[in-house]
Image (cartoon, rainbow, N blue to C red):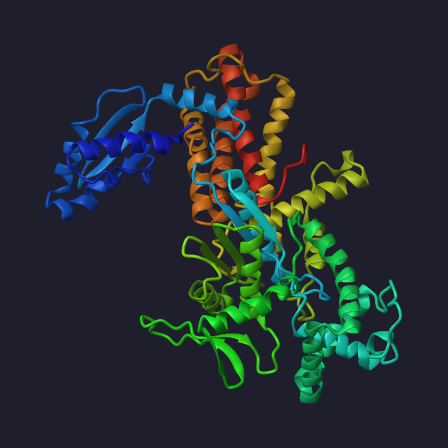
Amino acid sequence: MLSVIETLNEIFMNSFEQAGFDRELGRVTVSNRPDLCQFQVNGAMGGAKLYRKAPLMIAQEVLANIKENDIIKDVNVVAPGFININVKDEFLQNYLNGMLTSPKCGFENKEDIKTVVIDYGGPNVAKPLHVGHLRSAVIGEALKRLNRFYGNNVIGDAHLGDWGLQMGLIIHELKQRQPNLCYFDENYEGQYPDTAPFTLKDLEEIYPTASKKSKEDEVYLEDARNTTQELQSGRIGYRALWHHIMNVSLQDLKRNYGRLDVDFDYWYGESDADQYIPAMVEKMKKDGHAYISDGALIVDVKKETDTAPIPPCIILKSNGSAIYETTDLATLVQRRQDFNPDRVIYVVDKRQDLHFERVFRCAFKTGIVDEKTTLSFVGFGTVNGSDGKPFKTRSGGTMKLSELLDTVESKVSIKDSENMSQEELKELSQIIALSAIKYGDLQNPCESNYIFDIDKFASFEGNTGPYILYTMVRIKSILSKLNLNPFEGTNPFSSFTCDAERDLALSLIKFSHILTETVKKDAPSILCQYIYEISNKFNAFYHNKKILAETNETILHSLISLITLTLNVLDTSINLLGFKAPEKM
């Protein structure tokens, strides 16, 4: 079914066209003055300069083409040229009925279906997930779910950091500690052990130690770089250690991503793209795009229109080793071969904007992707503490993601805890905490920094995840007490009994439009704002209308249908945002 906005668009765009104006001027928006009207058209102002006419005259000519129909209740022009629209209650009720009986609350898959790859992991293996990994996981998972709901074919890829200097640092440090391990003997010809010579706890200590040494000792750093190059070149012992590192790390990564209810279709890493590098490099050379500069192989990506310096893409360092640009480009080669995507979305810290600008330019220039492919950078801001600086532990260190989850769960207050078992309490705390974290993040525009206020996010009042869940549980409680299902007749919705009921209905009918805007703009914050609006409208309606005391059967069935649809819209929306609602709180 068409969204209400699409239905009204068809009427007013046709009317603009019939009056001799550009039909695009007839696009309808939700009114920003709900006290005056429900919808509005502002195109007359835009057409004034184009057609050298007063916007009021344009609007009046457009209105002359609007015929009486089953949709519009009244339409009028307000100076300087706004077209204000109200729709008929019967149209609203019929539309609500369509939403109630639709598997997607009235949303229909679009015709412009795309194959979309979302790169939204990027953690380095051998290191625990921390607060800095929160946004890529939460935003990326929401974009994955939203695009799938929209109808796109979506592939989520973790794109693990498993092939760079950090691997060389770990292997080199391990060699300093246990030089007699068979992995370091170049003459060793036996079978390598199945069990890793370290634990996850060991790895979590080895990497920061090695990283600190590399910053203080140039010789140590150079040795680690050489180790990285040997690993990438195929040294057997180092490859065996690398497999151990991957096996130990992946278990922990999957466990912590699981706590966030985040999953990937592919747990690929930079290493998976390694096999594509030689052919990619040779093609760049053959086509004349890549050349040697100061010992490194580079591709110029600067354009004549650039006003700021754009450094070239470094394809291979002077020692022949690959860097991030190399593996990102080779990963695009792999993705084109495996998935042939129409679009690739990178959900990465916005401070990497220049890196991806260069990679994208290089990919198009060298033919790794064609002009029909869209490469999108969804850069996100930082998660900050109350001091406005990146979120830290009390001791000043970077907080592990597991610690953050534990902390938020401990802040959750459950009122009816006496009637729950310890297992139920733990599960409920996890559900509420996840809503607090994800909604607290997603309600902010992706590109914005935000302050992670645990007490605020875990509150059941205000614009928070727990408030949304509380609203949903309230609806579930009402439906449980009534023990009635929505009326299954031709149209279960009767006349609205109060303004609060109509206001709720007007918010519900925007669902399809909101979903479309959220997906097109890669902006989960739009959906968050919408479900907060729905929750507020429902609670205003709940306090205005005594649903449980209603004795008129026709009205009661209509009310049940309305709150059931409200629950369906909220439930669908929070699932798309990556969390769920409990049965009771």
Q: Which of 584 and 245 is in front in this view?
A: 245
Q: In this view, does 485 lie above or below 156?
A: above
Locate residue 504: give its quadrant.
top left
Residue 189, position in %: x, y?
Answer: 87, 73
Residue located 63% across and 39% down the image: 580
Does the image show residue 138?
Answer: yes
Residue 510, position in %: x, y?
Answer: 42, 34
Does the image show residue 325?
Answer: no
Direction front: furthest residue: 286
Direction left: furthest residue: 52
Residue located 62% across and 53% down the image: 455
Residue 384, position in %: x, y?
Answer: 56, 63
Locate residue 193: give its quadrant.
bottom right
Relative to residue 67, is residue 354 drawn left or right? right
Q: Nearer the viewer, residue 132 or 125?
A: 125
Count how many numbered circles sit on residues in the image: 0
Residue located 50% across and 64% down the image: 350
Residue located 66% across and 69% down the image: 163
Q: In this view, does 236 lie above or below 261?
A: below
State which quarter of the image contains the C terminus.
Answer: top right
Locate residue 548: give its quadrant.
top right
Relative to residue 70, is residue 549 drawn left or right? right
Q: Is residue 237 above or below residue 452?
A: below
Q: Nearer the viewer, residue 376 or 549?
A: 376
